[in-house]
Amino acid sequence: DLKLQFLYFIGRWAGRHLPIYMKRMLAFKSLEALTFDNAALRSLPVDESKNMEQRQVRGACFSLVHISPLEKPEVVGVSEDALRLLDVSKDDEGIAAYLSGSKVIPGSVPAAHCYCGHQFGSFAGQLGDGATMYLGEITNASGVKWELQIKGGGLTPYSRQGDGRKVLRSSLREFVCSEAMYYLKVPTTRSGSLVKAQESVVRDIMYDGNARMEPCSVITRIAPTFLRFGSFEICKKRDPETLKTGPSVEQPEVLTKLFNYMRESFFKDVPDTPTAVIEVFAEIVKSTAYLVSRWQCVGWCHGVLNTDNMSVLGLTIDYGPYGFLEHYDEWFICNASDQGGRYRYGAQPEVCRWNLKKLKEAFELIPGHESDGADMEKELAKYDMYYERFYNDLMGKKLGVVQGGVDETDPTGRPLNGFCNVPDDVPPHVKTLIDEFKRTLASTYSDYTQAFRSLSSPNPLEELVAAAASPSAAKEALLLKAKSLRLHVDPMQLKMILSMPHMVAELNNEANTDPKIVFIREEAMKLEMVGGVLMEVERYKEMDIADKKKVDKLKWEEFLENHYDKAAKVPNHAEQMNALNPCFIPRQWILQEVIAQCDTNPQPLADLLQRLKTPFTPSPLDDVYRSRPDASVVVT
């Protein structure tokens, strides 16, 4: 009897799934019922004046603030998985009001964090949360503590010339990428919701004088902590270049309290001993190397790697003008303000090492640890080794020539076993294979993400050629690269300087680290690169699609026959590669299209959020989301 069979299967399904569903429902709390701990405010010095005037905040790590309510908040998108970290349902009726700041969650204590930062290599003094507000810390039903923030909640003492608001365009980008990185197995802060309002603010997107009104919005941010390298720079002494100091320069005891809070809360395996600062720094060096190796492997560029945008836990934090690689380019620059290319894709490992050096200098100011510098320098010297091993190991796995699966991760994307297991160095032939793959990627302007997936397909050559850019797309990418290689010296003047014999000798002396010589050396490198790029542009002007496909086929045949096919693969390498190489990333043009619609139609954002959850599994939507052959990177 079909009816009895149907009832039987329904009963089995209910018996298996309903208990799980009911358990989840019972575990959910309303936002109003959350229990806040707020340990940071109990443990650290707090400015309790609630004075929102822009000012130097001395002797404090946080300032209590008033949230500025938004007008008629409306939920645009939610991340069910992120909200579940707080035991909050995606259907909670309080999301629009409480997670926009229009109402204050009972028990929360809104505050803004005081920190400093080196921005583009120069110490900027006090910065702080200019639009972000700490709400408090919540321990969920599993016993895990999370810090809850909102971004876009209004003015704080650290807003500087800003208005404390965020707009829908930038909020959506951070909301989406925070969740995308988690599913891509990259350590990250999380984002639970995106709420928009009817009110608008003026923004000049490209900083070109063409300002327009944009809708205000607020996102929820979730992490164990949002402490960053710049948190420890608030006691920095006068900088010899900018002449700025940290706001608490005369109160180094603040650093003692901040470090002790951080160690006791987030580095619990480090005991309170005279070497505690060195041991914590060693862990931060390792976690930072792991983090940037994941960025480089997935092909992601942060764009604003200032010390105030570096997490002490090795998390991706503060998503601004980020971008994923379309084609492989070490000089990919996703930030229109980065005129020198300091934060370009290929420079990220070096910049993170530089930022760690600044954290080391800040730690040396902790009372009683002034002499720890030499030991911390030894730990910093291990950074390059850590990075190379993490990077080569994962790249080898992505190419199917190093054995290993996906790291088991916690809800921030960090490995569950911590960062203790640094991989062994890969053999030289694996490094050669990685370099040859990247060289072929760059010369064919192939899609970075698609090329990895193509290698594990039944017809790799055919798919690799298909992943290569058309002549017009390659030309457009080259012109964008030439534009990003901005020279700060007139080319004619630079050529004249480079013709001076004594200057040539100084520039060729790599040991000469005089800032002026380093600057001219970098300008000369960029001038040479621009010349090469423009020559390539001319070559692609004369090339049609059929001709380029022939050239690309020859290049990929050479890579496959002389390198990849000869490399020993691990057992079940195709399955391993598909588990490590995404077939979907939130590309810039996809984000632009969702942004264009989300103010009136939230469905494209909901579809995108759903697709983010399974980036390693093909989907029928991938044909819609696949890279547009002539799409250029739009930085907003």
Image (tube, helix red, strand yellow):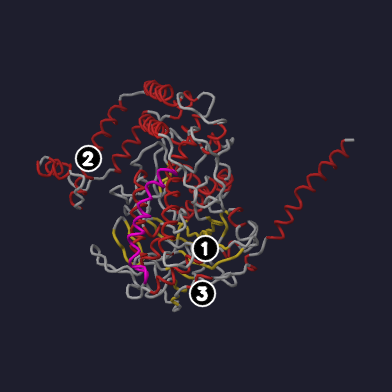
Mark 1 residue crowding within 10 angstroms, few (<14) / some (14–19) / many (20+): few
Residue 555 lies left or right of residue 219; in this view the side is left
- Please give the label number shown on residue 42: 3
Q: Dot 1 corresponds to which residue?
A: 268
Going by the numbered disc 1, the residue's amino acid type is: Lys
Q: Is residue 181 magenta?
A: no
Quadrant in which the N terminus appears: top right
Q: Secondary structure at mark 2?
A: helix
| Closer to viewer: mark 3 or mark 2 | 3
Label 2, label 1: how far apart the Cα atoms are? 50 Å
- The boundaries of the magenta stretch are 365-390
Going by the numbered disc 3, the residue's amino acid type is: Arg
- Please give the label number shown on residue 527: 2
Residue 182 lies left or right of residue 635; in this view the side is right
Q: Secondary structure at mark 1?
A: loop
Q: Is residue 177 above or below residue 443?
A: below
Label 3, label 2: how far apart the Cα atoms are? 54 Å
Q: Quadrant of residue 633?
A: top left
The front one of 315 and 359 is 359
Label 1, label 3: how far apart the Cα atoms are? 18 Å
Going by the numbered disc 2, the residue's amino acid type is: Leu
- Please give the label number shown on residue 351: none
Decide which of tag 3 and tag 2 comes sooner along the chain: 3
